[in-house]
Amino acid sequence: MVIEAEAAYRAVRSRDARFDGMFYTGVRTTGIYCRPSCPARTPHRRNVEFYPSAAAAQRAGFRACKLCRPDATPGSPDWDTRADLAGRAVRLIADGVVDRDGVPGLARRLGYSERQLTRALVAEMGAPPLALARAQRAHTARMLLENTELPASEVAFAAGFASIRQFNDTVRDIYATTPTSLRRRPGGGPGDGTTLELRLAYRQPMALDRTLNFLARRAVSGLEDYDGHRFRRVVRLPGGPGLITLAAGPGHIRAGLRLTAPRDVAAAVARVRRWLDLDADPESVAATLSGQAALAPLVQAHPGLRSPGAIDGFELAVRAVVGQQVSVAGARTVLGRIVQEYGEPAFAGTDWRLFPAPEVLAELDPTRLPMPRSRGRTITALAAAVAEGELDLSVGADRAATRARLLAVRGIGPWTADYVLMRAVGDPDIYLGTDLGVRQARAALPGFDPAACAPWRSYLTHHLWAAGH
């Protein structure tokens, strides 16, 4: 990522919070790095350097500022939206792939050599894969120390560190303090090793009610529920089932995580952030869409409207196929039956069930699914493609290749493929122009050009849907 130094310094002088997470300021005279909006006295221009990631600043020897806590900022929206190698890699690192499979495993997932991968990340992020993973582990550890009562030794392994010594050294290098000192900061809360309470930041504004209502209208019995105040759902994580509980806090999301394995905390947080689109840049989206007079009232009606992602790409794809030519309520009913019949129990003594794995649905006789036979065949073919590794529906997927492979599945057309790209793979520039709700909303708003809304046409789609509700 190229950072224009003079423009960055102007943002620092004005303490512009819109740039938090997009770059970081290293102050040579103090040895610390800050977010652009840091309230401390602005350093002289000659004493600062700019970095595209917290990992790059740490790699250069800077410690995190204790005042502005730059590691706790929402992530750069670039890495949620970019389709290139660096963007795909950053999203997979956030999901914990390096911690689980190492750099060789990440390179295999992306289809590049380790050398090519490292070169791309150093060029764009200023740091190689291991440094990016280390920065994430440090931030996860800090969250756990400040928000739970987990013993420091358990925090170390839950955050992904290989040893207590590595954990202590990293905390000392990045925060210039000890784990115990971090714990003494205000904000500690409950947490017993399997149940954690965290606060997740996002950029203002955010139409959180609209996002939760969008998810609630599609909530599947046994898998999710929403009582008007909190949204809960179970999720399949690398270490076992998890239960996520979400509620609004003042300027943040309150996230309760019940985990089978505490080491899954980073993956769970990354998936929630993508699911709710917490790293979006609402100012950029609003500026682009409002550039057309016909769309300005929509943006003003729902400031900060997000483009929700998915907790699990395969699940989202199945939802999209089931929802073809049926109402949202009808799709919920069918999906609820599939979850009850083929989903495994998530926790003993509860009614929560996990969404069926691809391997399970791939082996089914399509006629057993509660839908027309042709659609049942589409579901089993989709499941087989994912189970056999032919179709990647993760946030690290190559978007063009994924779309082509989806369209090769009989029964999946352009609308379904694009909907999956928008939500499962996280493409921010999908305009579902053939969607009935979108067509109806557009008919009432003549005079705008969807092409002029690039690269944020997924948000345009959601604004048009919102106009119909």
Image (cartoon, grey):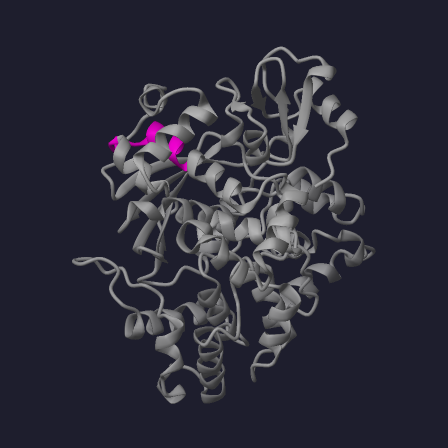
Residue 14 in view in this figure: no
160 in magenta: no
Quarter of the figure that contains the N terminus: top right
Residue nearest the viewer, comparing 196 with 464: 196
State which region is magenta: 140-151
- For residue 4, above or below residue 242: above
Residue 83 vertical position relative to residue 139 in the rendered view, above or below = below
Image quadrant in which you'd find residue 346:
bottom left
Between 79 and 55, the one nearer to me in the picture: 55
Residue drawn 51% across and 31% down? 71
Residue 307, image x, y percentages: 58, 52
Is the residue 156 above or below the residue 39 in the image?
below
Helix, strand or loop for the magenta stretch, by majority: helix
Q: Residue 391 at x, y = what percent?
A: 53, 72
Instruction: Kindly identify the residue that appears in the image at 75 percent across and 45 percent down.
Output: 288
Front residue of this view, candidates 95 and 322: 95
Q: Residue extending furthest front?
A: 115
Quarter that holds the C terminus: bottom right
Furthest residue in direction top, as rendered? 41
From this viewpoint, is residue 80 visible? yes
Q: Is residue 249 left or right of residue 64?
A: left
Q: Which residue lies furthest to the left in this view?
A: 349
Q: Position of residue 330 (x, y in %)?
A: 44, 72
Residue 220 at what x, y percent from top left? 38, 63
Q: In this view, does 58 lie to the left or right of 401?
A: left
Q: Give left or right: position of 419 versus 270.
A: right
Find residue 60 and report its image quarter.
top right
Relative to the observer, which residue lies in front, 428 or 35?
A: 35
Q: How many labels does the image show?
A: 0
Residue at image location 46% in from the left, 58% down from the top: 217
Q: Residue at x 30, y 29 (%)?
A: 189
